[in-house]
Image: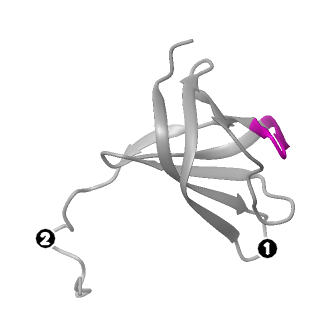
Amino acid sequence: MSYAYEGLDTVEMLALYQNQPPTKLITLELNVRLRGAGHQRFRVEFDHYLHGPQHANALRLVLPGGLLLQGPIVDGSNKAAGGWLLLDVEAHELPLEPPAYLNGWKWE
């Protein structure tokens, strides 16, 4: 099976609900496999239980090279031996350098 990406990744499980502050749990260097599953839909596979906040409903992946994939969890399975999540996402390139004009805010 051909994957769009296979390797270590930073994964954020998110609980995003209206009128509630967002909750997230970050897993660093999780071995994942990512493949397309339709228009703007991706399947993320992983090798062990993926911890997250209670009632997590979204996922964010920060891939090497600055590609950010995030979106709501559509379907999935999360078990001790691993699992998969199906996401509706839009790809976003992260900037490599801060913009020149930041409205008075400075990088430190």
Query: Which residue is outermost to the front?
Result: 81
Which residue in the protein does label 1 denote?
19
Q: Is residue 14 magenta?
A: no
Q: Is residue 35 above or below residue 46?
A: above
SS for dot 1: loop
Residue occupying the point 77% across, 36% down: 74
Mark 2 highlights which residue? 100
Q: List x then y, in percent, for residue 85.
A: 72, 37
Q: Position of residue 90 (x, y in %)?
A: 51, 38
Residue 51's image quarter? bottom right
Q: Which mark is residue 40?
A: none
Residue range in magenta is: 75-83
Query: Considering only order in the chain, which callout, 2 or 1, is on the residue closer to the N terminus?
Result: 1
Disc 1, disc 2: CB below 8 Å?
A: no
Q: CA distance from mark 1 to mark 2?
A: 34 Å
| Residue 22 in the figure: left or right of residue 31 | right
Q: Amino acid at mark 2?
A: Ala
In the picture as drawn, the residue positioned furthest to the top comes out as 1
Residue positioned 61% across, 65% down in the render: 26
**Residue at x-position 74% and y-position 42%:** 73
Callout count: 2
Q: Amino acid at mark 1?
A: Asn
Q: Give the vertical position of 18 relative to 92 (above or below).
A: below
In terms of secondary structure, what is the magenta stretch mainly? strand
Residue at the far left in the pictured view: 100
